[in-house]
Amino acid sequence: MIPAHALAGIACMHLGRLASRDKESWLWFGIAFAFISHAVIDALAIFTYHDASPSGSTFSQFVFWFWLAGAVSVIYWALHNDRRYGYGILAALSYDLWDHWILRGVACTSDGFPDGCMSVYAYEHLHLHHLEWFLLDTVFAGVERHYGDESYFIVELFCVALLCASVWWLRKHTPLPQEEEEE
């Protein structure tokens, strides 16, 4: 769910500011928090529908396009408000960019893209999602997964609403420094 990862990346920039007492290191803290946030959100996704597809059922297609439009909106809003949010968003999305786009692309290129790349999981030892899998195998071992259960789409909506409220609150109570202040 790209909007959730993007919103978490934005929130993490503020959390980096909150956690860092050193004005110069807040950005690095925020990027690190955003990177880790991906694994946490993906692990928590066991409680969500998380099965959107542009070629699935009508409901799945609706969810896919809904979240895609949401992702574009969130990223546009974030970059329009403060370009530094882009660092958090990029860090939060880095798992998917690396594992699903770069590694799959490299794996498919050598085969000439025979049947598309969606089912290719090559170079698994290089995947960043190992942290997510660790959380799933330890913290959430034995917990029922709800992927594909349409009624759990409401949980996704609730999570995104909670992230939106968190970003709103953090922007108000822990604003990022003015860019002139950083130098």
Image (cartoon, rainbow, N blue to C red):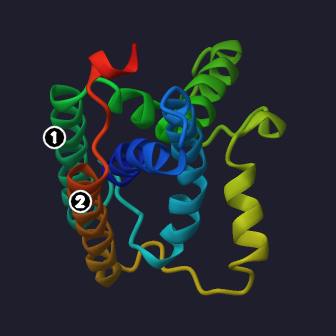
- For mark 2, give the secondary structure: helix
Tell me where residue 117 appears, x and y as whole percent: 56, 32
Dot placed on the residue nearer the N-terminal end, 2 or 1? 1
The three-letter code of the residue at mark 1 reads: Ser
Q: Residue at x 50, y 61 (%)?
A: 41
Q: Residue at x 63, y 35 (%)?
A: 99
Q: Is residue 128 left or right of residue 176?
A: right
- For mark 1, give the secondary structure: helix
Q: Nearer the viewer, residue 172 or 41?
A: 172
The three-letter code of the residue at mark 2 reads: Cys
Please tell me whether residue 79 is drawn above or below residue 19 in the rendered image.
Answer: above
Tell me where residue 34 appears, x and y as whole percent: 51, 44
Cα separation, mark 2 vs mark 1, equals 12 Å
Please tell me whether residue 164 is drawn above or below residue 100 in the rendered image.
Answer: below
Q: Nearer the viewer, residue 12 or 149?
A: 12
Q: Residue at x 67, y 58 (%)?
A: 132
Tell me where residue 124 appears, x and y as whole percent: 78, 40
Tell me where residue 81 appears, x and y as whole percent: 17, 31
The residue that disc 2 covers is 164
Q: Which mark is residue 19?
A: none
Q: Which mark is residue 73?
A: 1
Q: Is residue 100 visible?
A: yes
